[in-house]
Image (tube, helix red, strand yellow):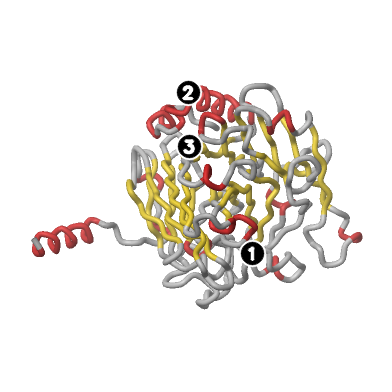
């Protein structure tokens, strides 16, 4: 039996593809979609060192990259960024939907402890080409002590149509304690390459000159809500290079928040990453809050405005440790968070062990095409939204 096990292990090692360079990724070599491990990934043009700590241990440049034959963007799980994945566009800008963040901010992954391989790691279950399946295991840990509060597993199925089906589930490691649970499963986080800020990567309204930081769509009506950011006059601020003002347009926020489904879109210059949730995918609207952080009133957001940080995805500091300034944004990538989704109205015990599904992808200028896809996916009911084969059959969103 020992010999059989050893032979099987050897065969497994031989069949596991070696990590390659990002430059070796060949979209034309796949018939649909492929997941590969790379050993030299760095986000956003960062050219500094990666001493560990505080950077990720073992290999901070390790990443799993999902690439499509027919689409120019890619889906990246970067070890340096705790493997929290994002859609990366050809321009270098990216959008992440984050992970289960712990109650009261006590435990998460955007910290020195969370960047350790022992607390966050990914496996390629299916490399493609008909689907690529990546599984992500992580443990929410306290940024100072490293104490573990909960564990989570997320599955991502990517299909040739450009869509990615996501499943999230978490379990407490501190049963009965508030900090042992997580009820914030999704945060819209936009990543800017070195030397760029939000007004360089968000799509601009040619009539007003404002940037679109958020578009919220109801799949079952014509409701659309925009969050628009206006860059401040440089003469009006000192070192707050991200300074701007936000305004919301469209119907009352509850028209979106109370719907049986919601689409969150981030209109970037070269594509529109989106995420879809709804009653039929495990997010009951009575207990799910969609919140926007820049123009906070009435949504439960944090009121950050156009505030940007540069501690992530290059993890040189812990969460919210450094606001972008005139010097740092020229050295590090930076990020900002227009909106998020929380389950604060759902008891901890109901969140634990529950499967939450969302559908993600990248659309183009026609946001109504994304709304159409969302409606078709959610109308299938819980049985269909959980089914990877159903997501694979949906029309591609351009």
Instruction: Give me the C-alpha separation between circle 3 and circle 1.
Output: 29 Å
Q: Quadrant of residue 122?
A: bottom left
Image position of 8 with respect to 129: above or below = below
Question: Residue 319 got which mark?
Answer: 1
Disc 3 target residue: 163
Residue at disc 2, secondary structure: loop
Question: Residue 380 got which mark?
Answer: 2
Residue 234 location in percent, x, y?
A: 86, 59
Residue at disc 3, secondary structure: loop
- Residue extending farthest front: 176
N-terminal-most mark, 3 or 2: 3
**Can residue 166 be seen from the camera position used here?**
no
Image position of 292 with respect to 385: above or below = below
Residue at disc 1, secondary structure: loop
Q: Residue at x 62, y 38 (%)?
A: 288
Say which of 362 and 246 sits in front: 246
- Frontmost of labels 3 and 1 is 1
Image position of 85 with respect to 377: above or below = below
Q: Residue at x 74, y 32 (%)?
A: 254
Instruction: Give me the C-alpha separation between circle 1 and circle 2.
Output: 38 Å
Say which of 348 and 371 sits in front: 348
316 left or right, relative to 253: left
- Residue extending farthest right: 236
Residue 200 location in percent, x, y?
A: 71, 52
Residue 268 location in percent, x, y?
A: 65, 44
């Amino acid at each position: 039996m020992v010999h059989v096990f050893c032979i099987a292990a050897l065969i497994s090692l031989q069949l596991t593809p070696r990590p390659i360079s990002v430059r070796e990724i060949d979209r034309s070599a796949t018939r649909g979609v492929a997941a590969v491990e790379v050993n030299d990934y760095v986000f956003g043009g960062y050219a500094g060192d990666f001493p560990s700590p505080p950077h990720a241990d073992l290999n901070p440049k390790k990443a799993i990259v999902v690439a499509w034959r027919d689409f120019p963007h890619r889906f990246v799980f970067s070890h340096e960024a705790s493997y929290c994945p994002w859609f990366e566009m050809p321009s270098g800008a990216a959008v992440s939907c984050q992970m289960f963040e712990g109650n009261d901010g006590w435990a998460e992954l955007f910290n020195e402890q969370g960047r350790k391989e022992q607390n966050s790691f990914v496996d390629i279950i299916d490399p493609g080409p008909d689907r690529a399946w990546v599984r992500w295991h992580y443990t929410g840990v306290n940024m100072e002590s490293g104490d573990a509060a909960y564990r989570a597993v997320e599955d991502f199925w990517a299909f040739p149509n450009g869509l990615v089906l996501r499943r999230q589930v978490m379990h407490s490691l501190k049963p009965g304690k508030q900090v042992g649970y997580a009820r914030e499963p999704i945060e819209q986080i936009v990543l800017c390459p070195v030397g760029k800020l939000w007004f360089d990567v968000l799509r601009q309204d040619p009539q007003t000159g404002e940037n679109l930081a958020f578009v919220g769509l109801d799949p079952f009506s014509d409701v659309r809500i925009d969050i628009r950011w206006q860059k401040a006059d440089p003469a009006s601020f000192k070192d707050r290079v991200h300074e701007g003002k936000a305004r919301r347009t469209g119907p009352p926020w509850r028209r979106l928040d109370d719907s049986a489904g919601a689409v969150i879109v981030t209109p970037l210059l070269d594509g529109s990453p989106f995420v879809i949730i709804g009653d039929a995918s495990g997010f009951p609207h009575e207990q799910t809050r969609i919140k926007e952080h820049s123009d906070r009133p009435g949504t439960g957001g944090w009121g950050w405005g156009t505030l940007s940080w540069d501690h992530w995805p290059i993890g040189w500091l812990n969460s919210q440790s450094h606001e972008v300034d005139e010097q740092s944004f020229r050295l590090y990538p930076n990020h900002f968070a227009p909106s998020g989704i929380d389950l604060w109205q759902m008891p901890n015990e109901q969140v634990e062990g529950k499967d939450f599904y969302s559908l993600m992808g990248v659309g183009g200028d026609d946001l109504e095409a994304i709304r159409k896809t969302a409606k078709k996916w959610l109308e299938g009911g819980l049985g269909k939204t959980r089914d990877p084969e159903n997501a694979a059959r949906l029309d591609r969103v351009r």
